[in-house]
Amino acid sequence: MVKINLVRKDKTAIKRVDQLKKISVWVTGITLVGFLLQVVFLTGRTAYLSWKGNNLDKKISNLKVTLSGREEEMVKYDGVKRRLEFILKEREDSYEYTAYLSEISSWLPSGAGLAAISFVNKEDIAFTLKAEDTDIYRNLEERLVNLDLEESDSLFSGLKQDGVMRNGTGEYLLRIIGRIK
């Protein structure tokens, strides 16, 4: 006959049930502790952000009070700033008249002169040169033809003769258009 040990089997089953109960208690405890730590962390973080927001609101209100006291100064500053910007823009857009005039006069031989000048647009300057007689006219024309504008530090990139005429006193008037670099 076969003997079955029922007592031993029951003790093993009881030990396993006890172990499972301990494991479930530990898992539940760890889960609860983790949950409580997250709640504490999020509550603290929310309180910190609220405190930081209140500080920023106070700083903003202080700056508003400070700026409202300086409103008149800011209006004056803005007007002055706009005027200065306008003046600077006008300066940048303006010609250097004296530099152009001195360069043109450096090309002239004795007996020749500058009769008229016109700043037509931002790219060209039209000017009229006068010569008292034919010899001075030829000398002037020869000088202008022999000018090397690219090698020198000239303000012009090229010259174009627009016309030649004689006025009532017999002087030659040579109209030239100079292209600005």
Image: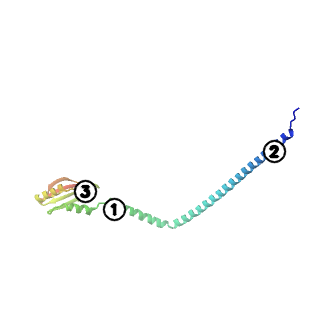
**Residue at horizontal 44 percent and vertical 65 percent from the top:** 77
Q: Nearer the viewer, mark 2 or mark 3?
A: 2
In this picture, residue 144 sits left or right of residue 14: left
The disc labelled 1 sits on which kind of residue?
Arg
Alpha-carbon span between mark 1 and mark 3: 20 Å
Of pointers 2 and 1, the one earlier in the residue sequence: 2
Nearer to us in this view, 76 or 158: 158
Write down the residue under mark 2: 15
Alpha-carbon span between mark 2 and mark 3: 107 Å
Nearer to us in this view, 87 or 140: 140
**Quadrant assignment for the N terminus:** top right
Write down the residue under mark 3: 156
Q: Residue furthest top?
A: 1
**Residue at horizontal 34 percent and vertical 60 percent from the top:** 92
Q: Residue furthest front?
A: 1
Nearer to us in this view, 55 or 25: 25
Number of numbered discs visible in the structure rendering: 3
Nearer to us in this view, 127 or 20: 20
Label 2: few (<14), some (14–19) or many (≥20) C-alpha neighbours in 10 Å: few
**Whole-percent x, y for residue 96 in the image:** 28, 61
